[in-house]
């Protein structure tokens, strides 16, 4: 197989998993396999790689594909490391590095400051609105930088997406804050707990709106669908809808621990004698809790669905049904597409 390499020692012993240019290192049909891949893709250590190191990794993979002897002499682990770096820092459709702070390797490290800002005790409405604005500004930038190239946005569409996300976040924050203020007066204990969930409700609502608006080009034009060998058969709007729907579900799932666990933990901690006698420990504890929540939320949520998604031909538009493989002439039963993250 032209894409496979088993690294050998002098004694002929296989070292590491056989390398493959197209297939995932881990089994993408299982949750654990997808989680292992996400840990590679979201690994913050990949942010330390320079542009030169990224270009070198791309060259190694390109040379390997062409059969270059030097590239093929590298170990499986070296080749997997090169592929992991490229997938973490380079856009899969364009082959161009994604800006450092907007690639998904940066997503987890960027979250704790946001969570701390949203959950800071005693913060007023101005602070809440600022952090909602910051979050939506960051989300729009990330969504745009990592969008499927089939749905390229114009500057006007991007401005509309940004306005929609910020308006939804700020509007829901303000509206729910007013609602919970009335709830606190009527039901002091229950209303207080409800107030903790305002950031979660606002961010999930705004994140979904932003995702849909930013990637509206995919909904309008479709995304490229291919067979298992990479032969492209056209753009499918149904595949685009499926991919964006899965991305929206993932965002809801990862925000459950990220925005619900910290306020519940801190509400309990503030009643303890330790925190009452050591109030300066609140920020370190909140930071630790927020970081743990990010790891517990984002990584597993992104592993729920595979990035290289599959869909049955029968679910797609008529033009994708009864199509045959150009080489084998076999009927195409399953198509593949990049759903984004």
Image: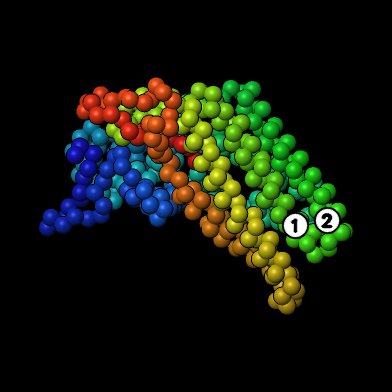
Q: Residue at x 56, y 51 (%)?
A: 254
Asked if the residues shown at circle 2 and circle 1 are in contact, with their CB atoms under 8 angstroms apart, the answer is yes
Can residue 152 be seen by looking at this rendering? no
Q: Residue 68: x percent and y percent?
A: 21, 35
Q: Residues within 10 Å of mark 2 (few under 14, many from 20)?
A: some
227 over 76 or under it: above or below: above
| Horizontal arrangement in the rendering, residue 42 relative to residue 116 (left or right) | left
Q: Position of residue 223 (x, y in %)?
A: 45, 28
**Residue found at the very far left of the displayed protein:** 11
In the image, is residue 206 above or below residue 158?
A: below
How many marks can you see? 2
**Residue with the mark numbered 1:** 194
| Marks 2 and 1, how far apart at CA | 8 Å
- Residue 269 visible from this viewpoint: yes
Using the image as rendered, state which of residue 30 and residue 291 is in the foreground: 30
Is 52 in front, or is 242? 242
Q: Position of residue 93 (x, y in %)?
A: 42, 31
Residue at position x 29%, y 33% from top? 229
Residue at numbered disc 2: 183
Q: Is residue 291 above or below residue 164?
A: below
């Amino acid at each position: 197989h032209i894409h496979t390499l088993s690294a050998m020692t002098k004694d002929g012993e296989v070292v590491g998993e056989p390398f493959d240019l197209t297939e995932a290192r881990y089994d993408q049909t299982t949750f654990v396999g997808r989680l292992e891949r996400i840990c590679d893709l979201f690994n913050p250590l990949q942010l330390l790689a320079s542009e030169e190191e990224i270009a070198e990794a791309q060259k190694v993979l390109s040379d390997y594909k062409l059969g270059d002897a030097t590239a093929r002499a590298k170990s499986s682990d070296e080749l997997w490391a090169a592929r992991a770096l490229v997938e973490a820092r380079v856009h899969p459709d364009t082959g161009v590095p994604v800006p450092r702070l907007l690639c998904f390797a940066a997503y987890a490290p960027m979250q704790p400051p946001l969570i701390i800002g949203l959950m800071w005790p005693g913060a007023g409405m101005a602070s809440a609105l600022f952090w909602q604005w910051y979050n939506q500004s960051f989300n729009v930038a990330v969504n745009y930088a990592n969008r499927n190239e089939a749905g390229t946005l114009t500057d006007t569409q991007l401005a509309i997406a940004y306005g929609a996300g910020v308006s939804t976040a700020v509007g829901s924050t303000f509206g729910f804050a007013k609602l919970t203020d009335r709830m606190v007066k009527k039901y002091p204990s229950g209303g207080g707990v409800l107030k903790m969930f305002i950031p979660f409700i606002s961010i999930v609502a705004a994140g979904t709106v932003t995702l849909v608006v930013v990637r509206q080009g995919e909904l309008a034009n479709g995304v490229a669908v291919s067979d298992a060998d990479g032969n492209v058969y056209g753009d499918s709007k149904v595949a685009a809808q499926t991919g964006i729907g899965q991305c929206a579900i993932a965002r809801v799932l990862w925000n459950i621990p990220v925005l619900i666990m910290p306020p519940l933990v801190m509400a309990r901690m503030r009643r303890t004698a330790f925190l009452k006698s050591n109030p300066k420990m609140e920020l370190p504890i909140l930071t630790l809790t927020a970081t743990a929540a990010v790891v517990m939320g984002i990584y597993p949520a992104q592993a729920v669905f595979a990035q290289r998604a599959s869909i049955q031909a029968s679910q797609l538009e008529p033009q994708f049904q009864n199509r045959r493989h150009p080489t084998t002439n076999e009927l195409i039963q399953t198509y593949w597409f990049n759903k984004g993250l």
